[in-house]
Amino acid sequence: MNSIECAYEAVTEVNRSKFIAHLVPISEYAGLQAKLKEKHPKANHVVYAVRYLNTYDQVVENSSDDGEPKGCAGVPALNVLRGEELINCAVLIVRYFGGIKLGTGGMARAYALAVKNVIKEAQIVPYEKESVYQFSTRYAEVDRTLYMLKELGIMHYDREFGMQDVAWSVTASQEKIACLKEKFISK
């Protein structure tokens, strides 16, 4: 399985219709369709397809045709995400009608092409299941801990400064957490 770490955008034109595809991590998906509709008030449709893992490691999929003929927009977009084995991401396609009817087959091919084009722009990374690791350090070890996190490429962390120590909550792949634990043991 693969994923993405940031948002990407690509424009595809088919028979004068313009398709603006947005590929985003699942964390940026909530409310994005409404924002795109507000940003593009003259657009005819904002179609989406979503794939993510739930807490039980099951793949959850959803799509919407947003007024396009049933199965001609969201499902082809979702099928491209499936084919590329992308997970924990969403694709939203803003369509401006160009005056030429595409037909159901042409429309399905156009939406699929728009998703393929935005995936070409994206930097695809292998999916790694992330876990949360909690630990505490003394105040004197904060800089060293930050250095270790940066060295391991762990960017998602929270810390809480208490009276006696600093409580850390780190979200990273199990492999990176194992390396972090090993570094703490060897200090």
Image (spheres, rainbow, N blue to C red):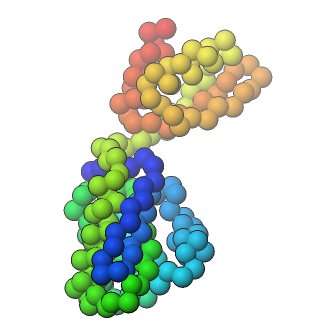
Q: Is residue 91 above or below residue 137?
A: below
Can residue 61 be spotted in the picture?
A: no
Looking at the rendering, which quadrant does residue 88 occupy? bottom left
> Which residue is situated farthest in the top direction here?
187
Q: What x and y, as percent, mark residue 74?
A: 35, 77
Residue at the image position 50 percent from the left and 25 percent from the top: 149
Counting from the top left corner in percent of width and height, residue 142 is at: 63, 18
Residue at 67% across / 24% down in the picture?
166
59 displayed left or right of 27: left
Position of 41 compared to 106: left or right?
right
Q: Residue furthest right?
A: 163
Q: Looking at the image, can residue 125 be seen?
A: yes
Q: Nearer the viewer, residue 132 or 101?
A: 101
Most foreground residue, 44 or 147: 44
Residue 166 vertical position relative to residue 15 in the rendered view, above or below: above
**Left or right of 155 on screen, residue 119:** left
Name the residue: 74% across, 26% down: 162
Give the x, y percent position of residue 31.
57, 67
Which residue is located at x 30 percent, y 44 percent?
A: 126
